[in-house]
Protein backbone atom coordinates (compact mmCIF):
# COMPACT_ATOMS: atom_id res chain seq x y z
CA UNK A 1 0.00 0.00 0.00
CA UNK A 2 2.86 2.36 0.68
CA UNK A 3 5.97 0.42 -0.41
CA UNK A 4 6.93 2.63 -3.38
CA UNK A 5 9.96 4.26 -1.83
CA UNK A 6 11.01 1.32 0.37
CA UNK A 7 13.58 -1.29 -0.64
CA UNK A 8 13.27 -3.46 2.46
CA UNK A 9 10.25 -4.92 4.25
CA UNK A 10 9.50 -4.23 7.91
CA UNK A 11 11.24 -6.04 10.73
CA UNK A 12 9.06 -8.65 12.43
CA UNK A 13 8.95 -6.53 15.59
CA UNK A 14 8.05 -3.48 13.51
CA UNK A 15 5.16 -5.41 12.01
CA UNK A 16 4.03 -6.53 15.43
CA UNK A 17 4.10 -3.12 17.07
CA UNK A 18 2.58 -1.44 14.03
CA UNK A 19 -0.35 -3.75 13.36
CA UNK A 20 -3.79 -2.96 14.72
CA UNK A 21 -5.76 -5.58 12.80
CA UNK A 22 -5.86 -7.76 15.92
CA UNK A 23 -8.36 -5.35 17.42
CA UNK A 24 -9.52 -2.81 14.84
CA UNK A 25 -11.29 -5.56 12.90
CA UNK A 26 -14.15 -4.58 15.16
CA UNK A 27 -14.50 -1.50 12.94
CA UNK A 28 -15.16 -3.57 9.79
CA UNK A 29 -18.79 -2.63 9.42
CA UNK A 30 -18.09 1.07 9.89
CA UNK A 31 -15.11 0.89 7.55
CA UNK A 32 -17.19 -0.60 4.77
CA UNK A 33 -20.01 1.92 5.34
CA UNK A 34 -17.53 4.81 5.20
CA UNK A 35 -15.96 3.51 1.99
CA UNK A 36 -19.32 2.97 0.32
CA UNK A 37 -20.38 6.53 1.12
CA UNK A 38 -17.04 7.85 -0.09
CA UNK A 39 -17.19 5.94 -3.39
CA UNK A 40 -20.76 7.04 -4.09
CA UNK A 41 -19.75 10.64 -3.43
CA UNK A 42 -16.67 10.39 -5.67
CA UNK A 43 -18.89 9.18 -8.53
CA UNK A 44 -21.44 11.94 -7.99
CA UNK A 45 -18.62 14.49 -7.98
CA UNK A 46 -17.29 13.04 -11.25
CA UNK A 47 -13.98 11.97 -9.67
CA UNK A 48 -14.53 8.29 -10.51
CA UNK A 49 -16.91 6.72 -13.03
CA UNK A 50 -20.29 5.33 -12.08
CA UNK A 51 -19.14 1.91 -13.31
CA UNK A 52 -16.13 1.97 -10.98
CA UNK A 53 -18.30 3.12 -8.08
CA UNK A 54 -20.77 0.29 -8.72
CA UNK A 55 -17.96 -2.28 -8.82
CA UNK A 56 -16.51 -0.86 -5.58
CA UNK A 57 -19.88 -0.94 -3.87
CA UNK A 58 -20.58 -4.55 -4.86
CA UNK A 59 -17.07 -5.57 -3.87
CA UNK A 60 -17.32 -3.90 -0.47
CA UNK A 61 -20.56 -5.72 0.24
CA UNK A 62 -18.87 -9.00 -0.60
CA UNK A 63 -15.96 -8.15 1.71
CA UNK A 64 -18.34 -7.32 4.54
CA UNK A 65 -20.26 -10.56 4.17
CA UNK A 66 -16.99 -12.50 4.15
CA UNK A 67 -16.00 -10.78 7.41
CA UNK A 68 -19.37 -11.24 9.05
CA UNK A 69 -19.52 -14.90 8.11
CA UNK A 70 -16.01 -15.48 9.43
CA UNK A 71 -14.64 -16.35 5.98
CA UNK A 72 -12.22 -13.42 5.78
CA UNK A 73 -8.48 -14.04 6.08
CA UNK A 74 -7.12 -11.10 8.07
CA UNK A 75 -3.46 -10.34 7.47
CA UNK A 76 -1.15 -8.71 9.97
CA UNK A 77 1.16 -7.67 7.17
CA UNK A 78 -1.69 -5.44 5.97
CA UNK A 79 -1.61 -3.62 9.32
CA UNK A 80 -5.15 -2.57 9.90
CA UNK A 81 -8.79 -2.99 8.95
CA UNK A 82 -8.62 -0.27 6.29
CA UNK A 83 -5.85 -1.95 4.31
CA UNK A 84 -7.22 -5.44 4.85
CA UNK A 85 -10.54 -4.38 3.35
CA UNK A 86 -8.96 -2.50 0.46
CA UNK A 87 -6.58 -5.32 -0.36
CA UNK A 88 -9.39 -7.85 -0.49
CA UNK A 89 -11.43 -5.45 -2.61
CA UNK A 90 -8.52 -5.33 -5.09
CA UNK A 91 -8.46 -9.11 -5.25
CA UNK A 92 -12.19 -9.18 -5.89
CA UNK A 93 -12.69 -6.36 -8.40
CA UNK A 94 -9.22 -5.45 -9.65
CA UNK A 95 -8.24 -2.00 -10.83
CA UNK A 96 -11.26 0.11 -9.69
CA UNK A 97 -10.34 -0.75 -6.08
CA UNK A 98 -7.28 1.45 -6.44
CA UNK A 99 -9.50 4.49 -7.10
CA UNK A 100 -11.40 4.24 -3.81
CA UNK A 101 -8.68 5.96 -1.81
CA UNK A 102 -8.85 9.13 -3.93
CA UNK A 103 -9.33 12.27 -1.85
CA UNK A 104 -9.07 10.55 1.51
CA UNK A 105 -6.48 9.10 3.86
CA UNK A 106 -6.44 6.48 6.55
CA UNK A 107 -6.33 9.40 8.96
CA UNK A 108 -9.85 10.59 8.17
CA UNK A 109 -10.92 7.03 7.48
CA UNK A 110 -10.07 5.81 10.95
CA UNK A 111 -11.53 8.97 12.47
CA UNK A 112 -14.89 8.43 10.80
CA UNK A 113 -14.96 4.68 11.47
CA UNK A 114 -14.20 5.10 15.13
CA UNK A 115 -16.65 7.95 15.56
CA UNK A 116 -19.44 5.84 14.10
CA UNK A 117 -18.48 2.95 16.35
CA UNK A 118 -18.47 5.11 19.49
CA UNK A 119 -21.72 6.75 18.41
CA UNK A 120 -23.36 3.32 18.24
CA UNK A 121 -22.02 2.54 21.73
CA UNK A 122 -23.60 5.76 23.00
CA UNK A 123 -26.93 4.53 21.63
CA UNK A 124 -26.36 1.17 23.27
CA UNK A 125 -25.50 2.77 26.62
CA UNK A 126 -28.61 4.93 26.49
CA UNK A 127 -30.81 1.91 25.77
CA UNK A 128 -29.11 -0.01 28.59
CA UNK A 129 -29.62 2.86 31.00
CA UNK A 130 -33.28 3.16 30.07
CA UNK A 131 -33.82 -0.54 30.74
CA UNK A 132 -32.10 -0.20 34.10
CA UNK A 133 -34.17 2.85 35.02
CA UNK A 134 -37.35 0.99 34.14
CA UNK A 135 -36.30 -1.83 36.46
CA UNK A 136 -35.67 0.70 39.25
CA UNK A 137 -39.03 2.39 38.72
CA UNK A 138 -40.69 -1.05 38.81
CA UNK A 139 -38.96 -1.68 42.16
CA UNK A 140 -40.26 1.65 43.48
CA UNK A 141 -43.81 1.43 42.19
CA UNK A 142 -46.19 0.14 44.85
CA UNK A 143 -43.44 0.42 47.48
CA UNK A 144 -43.52 4.20 47.88
CA UNK A 145 -44.47 3.71 51.53
CA UNK A 146 -42.30 0.69 52.40
CA UNK A 147 -40.18 2.07 55.23
CA UNK A 148 -36.48 1.37 55.52
CA UNK A 149 -33.58 3.06 57.29
CA UNK A 150 -31.99 6.03 55.57
CA UNK A 151 -28.26 6.30 56.19
CA UNK A 152 -25.55 8.88 56.35
CA UNK A 153 -22.05 7.58 57.19
CA UNK A 154 -23.79 4.18 57.03
CA UNK A 155 -25.24 5.12 60.43
CA UNK A 156 -28.97 5.06 60.94
CA UNK A 157 -30.09 8.62 60.12
CA UNK A 158 -33.81 9.00 59.37
CA UNK A 159 -36.41 6.57 58.07
CA UNK A 160 -36.99 6.71 54.32
CA UNK A 161 -38.86 4.46 51.92
CA UNK A 162 -37.72 1.76 49.52
CA UNK A 163 -39.42 3.58 46.68
CA UNK A 164 -37.57 6.77 47.53
CA UNK A 165 -34.24 4.96 47.64
CA UNK A 166 -34.84 3.31 44.24
CA UNK A 167 -35.86 6.62 42.71
CA UNK A 168 -32.61 8.22 43.93
CA UNK A 169 -30.78 5.91 41.52
CA UNK A 170 -33.23 6.74 38.74
CA UNK A 171 -32.16 10.38 39.08
CA UNK A 172 -28.47 9.41 38.92
CA UNK A 173 -28.85 7.15 35.91
CA UNK A 174 -31.09 9.76 34.28
CA UNK A 175 -28.20 12.22 34.41
CA UNK A 176 -25.89 9.54 33.00
CA UNK A 177 -28.32 9.06 30.15
CA UNK A 178 -28.29 12.77 29.38
CA UNK A 179 -24.48 12.80 29.41
CA UNK A 180 -24.42 10.14 26.66
CA UNK A 181 -27.09 12.08 24.77
CA UNK A 182 -25.03 15.28 24.96
CA UNK A 183 -21.81 13.52 23.97
CA UNK A 184 -23.53 11.87 21.05
CA UNK A 185 -24.91 15.16 19.76
CA UNK A 186 -21.46 16.76 19.98
CA UNK A 187 -19.65 13.88 18.24
CA UNK A 188 -22.15 13.66 15.40
CA UNK A 189 -20.02 15.57 12.89
CA UNK A 190 -18.30 13.74 10.06
CA UNK A 191 -14.49 13.94 9.72
CA UNK A 192 -14.42 12.09 6.37
CA UNK A 193 -12.96 14.36 3.71
CA UNK A 194 -10.36 15.92 5.99
CA UNK A 195 -8.04 13.52 4.13
CA UNK A 196 -4.55 13.26 5.61
CA UNK A 197 -4.84 16.57 7.47
CA UNK A 198 -5.23 19.50 5.10
CA UNK A 199 -8.30 18.59 3.07
CA UNK A 200 -8.09 17.61 -0.58
CA UNK A 201 -7.83 19.17 -4.04
CA UNK A 202 -10.54 16.86 -5.38
CA UNK A 203 -14.03 18.37 -5.63
CA UNK A 204 -15.49 16.22 -2.86
CA UNK A 205 -18.89 16.80 -1.29
CA UNK A 206 -18.52 16.47 2.47
CA UNK A 207 -22.16 17.29 3.10
CA UNK A 208 -23.12 14.27 1.04
CA UNK A 209 -20.93 11.76 2.89
CA UNK A 210 -21.88 13.26 6.25
CA UNK A 211 -25.55 12.80 5.47
CA UNK A 212 -25.09 9.28 4.07
CA UNK A 213 -23.38 8.20 7.29
CA UNK A 214 -26.02 9.71 9.58
CA UNK A 215 -24.02 12.73 10.74
CA UNK A 216 -25.55 16.14 11.29
CA UNK A 217 -22.82 17.94 9.33
CA UNK A 218 -19.14 17.65 8.35
CA UNK A 219 -16.48 18.69 10.87
CA UNK A 220 -15.33 22.26 10.24
CA UNK A 221 -11.53 22.02 10.47
CA UNK A 222 -9.57 19.28 8.72
CA UNK A 223 -6.63 19.41 11.15
CA UNK A 224 -8.89 19.01 14.17
CA UNK A 225 -10.81 16.27 12.36
CA UNK A 226 -7.85 13.89 12.22
CA UNK A 227 -6.08 15.06 15.38
CA UNK A 228 -8.72 14.87 18.03
CA UNK A 229 -10.31 12.02 19.93
CA UNK A 230 -12.42 13.93 22.39
CA UNK A 231 -15.53 12.13 21.18
CA UNK A 232 -14.02 8.93 22.59
CA UNK A 233 -12.89 10.69 25.76
CA UNK A 234 -16.37 12.06 26.33
CA UNK A 235 -17.83 8.61 25.83
CA UNK A 236 -15.38 7.21 28.38
CA UNK A 237 -16.08 10.03 30.83
CA UNK A 238 -19.81 9.36 30.63
CA UNK A 239 -19.15 5.62 30.91
CA UNK A 240 -16.91 6.15 33.96
CA UNK A 241 -19.54 8.17 35.78
CA UNK A 242 -22.18 5.59 34.96
CA UNK A 243 -19.87 2.82 36.19
CA UNK A 244 -19.28 4.81 39.39
CA UNK A 245 -23.02 4.95 39.96
CA UNK A 246 -23.33 1.24 39.20
CA UNK A 247 -20.66 0.53 41.79
CA UNK A 248 -22.59 2.37 44.48
CA UNK A 249 -25.78 0.47 43.76
CA UNK A 250 -23.79 -2.76 43.62
CA UNK A 251 -22.25 -2.03 46.99
CA UNK A 252 -25.69 -1.57 48.50
CA UNK A 253 -26.89 -4.85 47.02
CA UNK A 254 -23.87 -6.60 48.52
CA UNK A 255 -24.53 -5.08 51.96
CA UNK A 256 -28.30 -5.56 51.84
CA UNK A 257 -28.07 -9.21 50.85
CA UNK A 258 -25.71 -10.10 53.71
CA UNK A 259 -26.99 -12.25 56.60
CA UNK A 260 -26.36 -9.33 58.96
CA UNK A 261 -28.55 -6.87 57.03
CA UNK A 262 -31.09 -9.12 55.22
CA UNK A 263 -32.70 -6.05 53.64
CA UNK A 264 -33.21 -7.76 50.31
CA UNK A 265 -32.68 -11.04 48.56
CA UNK A 266 -30.91 -11.46 45.24
CA UNK A 267 -32.27 -14.24 43.07
CA UNK A 268 -30.55 -17.57 42.44
CA UNK A 269 -30.09 -16.40 38.87
CA UNK A 270 -27.67 -13.69 39.96
CA UNK A 271 -25.82 -15.32 42.84
CA UNK A 272 -23.43 -18.24 43.17
CA UNK A 273 -22.81 -20.86 45.82
CA UNK A 274 -19.61 -21.77 47.56
CA UNK A 275 -17.87 -25.07 47.01
CA UNK A 276 -17.05 -25.38 50.70
CA UNK A 277 -19.67 -23.36 52.65
CA UNK A 278 -23.13 -24.70 51.82
CA UNK A 279 -25.02 -21.75 53.35
CA UNK A 280 -23.47 -19.19 50.99
CA UNK A 281 -25.22 -17.16 48.30
CA UNK A 282 -22.53 -14.94 46.95
CA UNK A 283 -23.55 -11.72 45.18
CA UNK A 284 -20.93 -12.18 42.43
CA UNK A 285 -22.81 -10.23 39.76
CA UNK A 286 -23.10 -7.24 42.07
CA UNK A 287 -19.44 -7.49 43.01
CA UNK A 288 -18.35 -7.63 39.39
CA UNK A 289 -20.62 -4.73 38.46
CA UNK A 290 -19.03 -2.85 41.37
CA UNK A 291 -15.56 -3.63 40.04
CA UNK A 292 -16.07 -2.67 36.38
CA UNK A 293 -15.48 0.99 37.12
CA UNK A 294 -11.81 0.07 37.57
CA UNK A 295 -11.24 -0.79 33.95
CA UNK A 296 -13.70 1.77 32.57
CA UNK A 297 -12.12 4.67 34.44
CA UNK A 298 -8.77 3.09 33.59
CA UNK A 299 -9.69 3.36 29.91
CA UNK A 300 -10.41 7.06 30.32
CA UNK A 301 -7.05 7.60 32.01
CA UNK A 302 -5.30 5.51 29.33
CA UNK A 303 -6.77 7.42 26.41
CA UNK A 304 -6.40 10.90 27.87
CA UNK A 305 -2.76 10.07 28.64
CA UNK A 306 -2.21 8.91 25.04
CA UNK A 307 -3.70 12.10 23.59
CA UNK A 308 -2.06 14.43 26.10
CA UNK A 309 0.85 16.35 24.61
CA UNK A 310 0.38 15.10 21.03
CA UNK A 311 1.28 17.79 18.53
CA UNK A 312 -1.27 18.24 15.77
CA UNK A 313 -2.31 16.36 13.79
CA UNK A 314 -2.43 12.56 13.57
CA UNK A 315 0.33 10.56 15.25
CA UNK A 316 0.52 6.79 15.39
CA UNK A 317 0.10 7.05 19.15
CA UNK A 318 -3.56 7.48 18.34
CA UNK A 319 -3.84 3.87 17.22
CA UNK A 320 -3.74 3.14 20.96
CA UNK A 321 -7.16 4.77 21.25
CA UNK A 322 -9.23 1.72 20.38
CA UNK A 323 -8.56 -1.08 22.81
CA UNK A 324 -9.41 0.88 25.96
CA UNK A 325 -12.66 2.06 24.38
CA UNK A 326 -13.58 -1.42 23.16
CA UNK A 327 -12.96 -2.89 26.59
CA UNK A 328 -14.83 -0.11 28.39
CA UNK A 329 -17.83 -0.45 26.08
CA UNK A 330 -18.01 -4.23 26.57
CA UNK A 331 -17.65 -3.85 30.32
CA UNK A 332 -20.29 -1.16 30.56
CA UNK A 333 -22.84 -3.08 28.49
CA UNK A 334 -22.33 -6.17 30.64
CA UNK A 335 -22.51 -4.31 33.94
CA UNK A 336 -25.70 -2.51 32.89
CA UNK A 337 -27.33 -5.76 31.78
CA UNK A 338 -26.31 -7.56 34.99
CA UNK A 339 -27.64 -4.75 37.17
CA UNK A 340 -30.93 -4.65 35.25
CA UNK A 341 -31.28 -8.40 35.69
CA UNK A 342 -30.51 -8.28 39.40
CA UNK A 343 -33.04 -5.51 40.00
CA UNK A 344 -35.74 -7.32 38.08
CA UNK A 345 -35.49 -10.18 40.57
CA UNK A 346 -34.57 -8.28 43.73
CA UNK A 347 -36.95 -9.00 46.64
CA UNK A 348 -36.98 -6.48 49.51
CA UNK A 349 -37.63 -7.96 52.98
CA UNK A 350 -40.42 -5.69 54.19
CA UNK A 351 -40.49 -6.96 57.79
CA UNK A 352 -36.78 -6.66 58.23
CA UNK A 353 -36.68 -3.19 56.61
CA UNK A 354 -39.45 -1.98 58.93
CA UNK A 355 -37.63 -3.32 61.97
CA UNK A 356 -34.33 -1.76 60.94
CA UNK A 357 -36.03 1.54 60.07
CA UNK A 358 -36.97 2.10 63.71
CA UNK A 359 -33.64 1.06 65.17
CA UNK A 360 -30.85 3.43 66.13
CA UNK A 361 -33.12 6.27 67.31
CA UNK A 362 -34.04 6.98 63.68
CA UNK A 363 -36.87 9.32 64.71
CA UNK A 364 -34.69 11.58 66.87
CA UNK A 365 -34.95 14.38 64.32
CA UNK A 366 -38.74 14.06 64.41
CA UNK A 367 -38.63 14.48 68.19
CA UNK A 368 -36.45 17.58 67.90
CA UNK A 369 -38.74 19.02 65.22
CA UNK A 370 -41.75 18.37 67.51
CA UNK A 371 -40.08 20.29 70.36
CA UNK A 372 -39.64 23.22 67.95
CA UNK A 373 -43.20 23.06 66.61
CA UNK A 374 -45.14 22.21 69.78
CA UNK A 375 -43.08 23.94 72.46
CA UNK A 376 -41.48 26.73 70.48
CA UNK A 377 -37.93 25.68 71.44
CA UNK A 378 -35.11 27.03 69.27
CA UNK A 379 -33.85 24.13 67.10
CA UNK A 380 -30.42 24.12 68.74
CA UNK A 381 -32.00 23.66 72.17
CA UNK A 382 -34.43 21.04 70.87
CA UNK A 383 -31.41 19.19 69.48
CA UNK A 384 -29.80 19.27 72.92
CA UNK A 385 -32.93 18.02 74.72
CA UNK A 386 -33.34 15.22 72.17
CA UNK A 387 -29.70 14.25 72.64
CA UNK A 388 -30.31 13.87 76.37
CA UNK A 389 -33.38 11.70 75.70
CA UNK A 390 -31.45 9.50 73.26
CA UNK A 391 -28.76 9.07 75.91
CA UNK A 392 -31.40 8.07 78.45
CA UNK A 393 -32.99 5.53 76.08
CA UNK A 394 -29.59 4.13 75.18
CA UNK A 395 -28.68 3.66 78.84
CA UNK A 396 -31.64 1.41 79.40
CA UNK A 397 -31.46 -0.34 76.05
CA UNK A 398 -34.76 1.10 74.82
CA UNK A 399 -36.01 3.04 71.79
CA UNK A 400 -37.24 6.63 72.06
CA UNK A 401 -40.88 5.54 71.91
CA UNK A 402 -40.28 3.23 74.93
CA UNK A 403 -39.45 6.18 77.22
CA UNK A 404 -42.29 7.03 79.65
CA UNK A 405 -43.73 10.52 79.81
CA UNK A 406 -42.12 10.88 83.27
CA UNK A 407 -38.70 10.03 81.88
CA UNK A 408 -39.16 12.58 79.13
CA UNK A 409 -40.41 15.25 81.48
CA UNK A 410 -37.37 14.75 83.68
CA UNK A 411 -35.43 16.22 80.76
CA UNK A 412 -38.01 18.73 79.47
CA UNK A 413 -41.07 19.26 81.74
CA UNK A 414 -43.29 20.72 78.99
CA UNK A 415 -43.36 17.54 76.87
CA UNK A 416 -46.88 16.09 76.45
CA UNK A 417 -48.42 12.78 75.40
CA UNK A 418 -48.72 14.12 71.83
CA UNK A 419 -45.00 13.58 71.33
CA UNK A 420 -45.52 9.84 70.78
CA UNK A 421 -47.35 10.48 67.52
CA UNK A 422 -44.14 11.65 65.84
CA UNK A 423 -41.98 8.81 67.11
CA UNK A 424 -43.21 6.10 64.71
CA UNK A 425 -41.35 5.54 61.46
CA UNK A 426 -44.59 5.81 59.46
CA UNK A 427 -45.33 9.23 60.91
CA UNK A 428 -41.75 10.23 60.30
CA UNK A 429 -41.73 9.44 56.56
CA UNK A 430 -45.27 10.75 56.05
CA UNK A 431 -44.23 14.11 57.51
CA UNK A 432 -41.40 14.68 55.03
CA UNK A 433 -43.63 16.33 52.45
CA UNK A 434 -41.10 18.84 51.13
CA UNK A 435 -40.50 18.64 47.37
CA UNK A 436 -38.32 15.61 46.63
CA UNK A 437 -38.81 14.31 50.19
CA UNK A 438 -39.48 10.76 51.34
CA UNK A 439 -43.22 11.14 52.09
CA UNK A 440 -44.98 8.37 50.13
CA UNK A 441 -47.11 10.99 48.38
CA UNK A 442 -43.97 12.69 47.12
CA UNK A 443 -42.34 9.45 46.05
CA UNK A 444 -45.47 8.56 44.08
CA UNK A 445 -45.05 11.80 42.17
CA UNK A 446 -41.46 10.89 41.33
CA UNK A 447 -42.51 7.44 40.15
CA UNK A 448 -45.31 8.88 37.99
CA UNK A 449 -43.01 11.48 36.45
CA UNK A 450 -40.34 8.96 35.49
CA UNK A 451 -42.83 6.37 34.26
CA UNK A 452 -44.09 8.94 31.82
CA UNK A 453 -40.60 9.99 30.75
CA UNK A 454 -39.51 6.39 30.23
CA UNK A 455 -42.65 5.28 28.42
N1 LIG B 1 -4.46 1.88 12.07
C1 LIG B 1 -4.36 3.30 12.14
C2 LIG B 1 -5.03 3.80 13.43
O1 LIG B 1 -5.75 3.06 13.99
C3 LIG B 1 -5.04 3.93 10.97
C4 LIG B 1 -4.53 5.27 10.61
C5 LIG B 1 -3.13 5.14 10.11
N2 LIG B 1 -2.64 6.35 9.55
C6 LIG B 1 -1.36 6.51 9.25
N3 LIG B 1 -1.02 7.65 8.76
N4 LIG B 1 -0.49 5.58 9.46
O2 LIG B 1 -4.80 4.88 13.89
Image (spheres, rainbow, N blue to C red):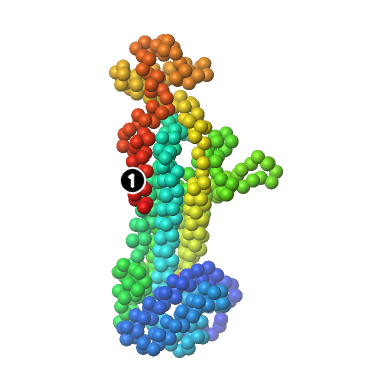
* Corner quadrant of residue 390: top left
Name the residue carrying label 1. Answer: 449
Is residue 42 in sight in this rendering?
A: yes
Is residue 233 in sight in this rendering?
A: no
* Corner quadrant of residue 116: bottom left
Q: Position of residue 168 (x, y in %)?
A: 40, 42
- Residue at 32% x, 80% y is 204
Q: Position of residue 271 (x, y in %)?
A: 59, 47
Does 144 appear above or below 132? Answer: above
Q: Position of residue 366 (x, y in %)?
A: 38, 25
Does mark 1's beta carbon lie closer than 8 Å to ligand 1? no
Q: Is residue 414 left or right of residue 330?
A: left
Q: How many numbered tags mark residues here?
A: 1
Residue in the foreground of this view, choosing between 219 and 118: 118
Q: Is residue 188 left or right of residue 143?
A: left
Residue occupying the far right of the picture: 276
- Residue at 34% x, 57% y is 182
- Residue at 41% x, 77% y is 35
Does 298 appear above or below 196? Answer: above
Q: Position of residue 31 (x, y in %)?
A: 44, 73
Q: Are there few (<14), some (14-19), or many (20+) residues within 10 Å of tag 1?
A: few
Q: SS of the residue at dot 1? A: helix
- Residue at 31% x, 76% y is 208
Does 82 appear above or below 295? Answer: below
Amino acid sequence: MWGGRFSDGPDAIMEEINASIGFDRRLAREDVAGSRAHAAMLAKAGVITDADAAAIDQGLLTVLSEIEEGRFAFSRALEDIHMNVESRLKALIGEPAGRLHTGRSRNDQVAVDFRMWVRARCDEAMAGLEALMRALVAQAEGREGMVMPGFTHLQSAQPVTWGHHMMAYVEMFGRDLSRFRDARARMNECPLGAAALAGTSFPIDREMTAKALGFDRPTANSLDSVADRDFALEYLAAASITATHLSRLSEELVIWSSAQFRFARLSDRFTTGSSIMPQKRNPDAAELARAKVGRILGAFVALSTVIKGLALTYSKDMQEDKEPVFDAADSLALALAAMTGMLGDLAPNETRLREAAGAGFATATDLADWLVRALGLPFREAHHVTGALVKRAEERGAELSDLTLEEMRAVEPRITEAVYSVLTVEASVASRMSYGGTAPARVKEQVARWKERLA
